[in-house]
Image: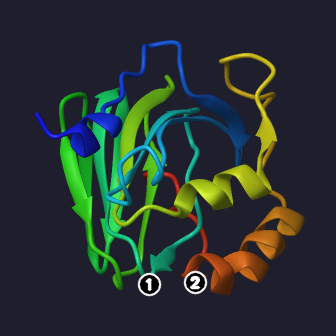
Amino acid sequence: MDELLLQRFRTVGADDGAAYWFLGTLMIIKATGEDTGGAFTLFEQLAPPGFGPPLHVHHREDEPFFVLEGRARFRCGDREFVMESGGYVFLPKGVPHAFRIEGSTPARLLQMTLPPGFERLVEEISVIAPSRTLPPPAPISADIIGRLAALGSKYHFSIVGPPLDAEG
């Protein structure tokens, strides 16, 4: 067996990974770019009902999502669709996208970024979670949106619109 390949071998338990409160969600970094030899970043995200990031474009990363629990509405370009537990979506770089947690319960998502690097934004704009729970409810403030927009060039993304509206 190749020793260099074995050096990249990792295991991460259910309760492992650095945990952050990110934009009103709990974001757990399960694998960083360093962990994967520069291949991807893997997050587990717990998001409250109604949560959704602003419409944005990643200029560098593709983003696959797998819905572990709950229900999320995704927008990619001009298409919208709902994914429930067990559903998967691939959001390609260069295309405006967003999502919104639907229903009355939180959703749990696995999110990847390929290539890695988005974990650095999470670390920079978040606070370390004191517990593996959702943060206290609070809307995403204009200040946070401003901080995100200012970091866009550093992390290769642009905010191009508001979060998705509630289903109506």
Q: Is residue 126 above or below residue 18?
A: below
Return the residue nearer the eye: 166 or 147.
147
* x 73%, y 77%: residue: 151
Quarter-wise, where is residue 58 in the image? bottom left
Q: Secondary structure at mark 2?
A: strand
Q: Amino acid at mark 1?
A: His
| Residue 157 x %, y % | 55, 80
Q: Secondary structure at mark 1?
A: loop
Is the C-beta separation of discs 2 and 1 under 8 Å? yes
For the view shown, which residue lies furthest in the left direction?
Answer: 1
Q: Amino acid at mark 2?
A: Ser
* x 44%, y 61%: residue: 116
Q: Is residue 106 above or below residue 41?
A: above
Q: Viewer-nearest of labels 2 and 1?
A: 1
Residue under numbered circle 2? 158
Residue under numbered circle 1? 59
For the view shown, which residue lies furthest in the right direction?
Answer: 143
Q: How is the image coloured?
A: rainbow
For disc 2, the neighbor class at 10 Å (few under 14, some 14 to 19, many from 20) is: many
| Residue 24 x %, y % | 71, 41
Mark 2 or mark 1: which comes first in sequence?
1
Side of 74 where 128 appears, left or right: right
* x 82%, y 41%: residue: 127
| Residue 48 x %, y % | 58, 32
Q: CA distance from mark 2 to mark 1?
A: 8 Å
Image quadrant for the N terminus?
A: top left
For disc 1, the neighbor class at 10 Å (few under 14, some 14 to 19, many from 20) is: some
* x 58%, y 83%: residue: 158
Q: Which mark is residue 8?
A: none
Quarter-wise, where is residue 93 in the image? bottom left
Side of 74 where 83 appears, left or right: left
Side of 46 where 94 appears, left or right: left
